[in-house]
Image (spheres, rainbow, N blue to C red):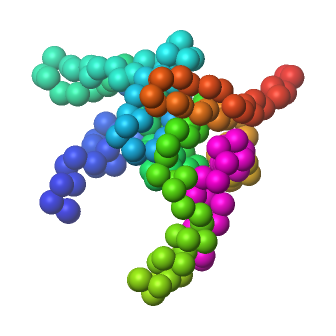
Amino acid sequence: MGKFEEFQFRTQPWFDQSNFQGFNQAIPMKTIVIYCFDPRAAEIPQAVAAYFGDEVYPGENIFNEEGARVGHTRTLFTVSNAGGRALSALQSVATMEYLFHVQNVVVVHHSFCGATAFTPDQLMNEFHEHHHADLTSIIDHDSMAIMDYEKSLQHDLDILRNSPAVPKNIKLYGFFYEMNSGTLTEVLRDIPVQEKA
């Protein structure tokens, strides 16, 4: 037994892992927003929630009679990384799909992002020269920097759509956020055609 074993779902007598259907009853999560961790763009999740109109963010905790946190009202989950790139978020998308049966994945790139301050080759060369490290085997070349916002968003939506970590029924969106005005612009959407029963 590990030191914190008692805090795992798998060790709880009431938790049936073989019959797990998701945590949606406790947390009605349906949308993942992938965006840059630049603190100047911290309002992106609220902007996306307002754009869709039926999302709750940030939401609030739900407590039981004993004061334990048993749920939350949030419907929108966030994944932050350098540049808000899809490649870095794939593991999170797969995990959240398993836990919450995600319906939407949204990628947002913002104005004056640090990822527009260099080219992929500059970043790779910098690491090679100063750290003697080769990034080419671990990072997709076109996910290293943002050379063109529209092409970058298309690249990220293509990564998501073509990844086995993203079920084909999930709706994909690409947005540009101008952080000084707070304007969120939908650039792309990839909505799967619903099959008739």
Q: Residue at x 50, y 43 (%)?
A: 112
Query: In this orientation, which residue lies closer to the viewer: 90 or 118?
Result: 118
Q: Provide residue 5's location: percent of width, then percent of height.
A: 21, 54
Q: Residue at x 18, y 27 (%)?
A: 68
Left or right of residue 146: residue 197: right
Q: Provide residue 114's location: percent of width, then percent of height.
A: 47, 52
Residue 145 magenta: yes
Q: Residue at x 28, y 41 (%)?
A: 13
- Name the quarter where the N terminus is drawn: bottom left
Residue 106 visible in the shown view = no
Left or right of residue 74: residue 147: right
Residues rendered magenta in the picture: 136-157
Q: Provide residue 48's location: percent of width, then percent of height.
A: 51, 24
| Outermost residue, right side | 196
Q: Residue at x 28, y 48 (%)?
A: 8
| Outermost residue, top side | 53
Vertically, is 2 above or below 185?
below
- Name the quarter where the C terminus is drawn: top right
Query: In this orientation, which residue lies closer to the viewer: 97 or 15?
Result: 97
Q: How many marks?
A: 0
Residue 6 magenta: no
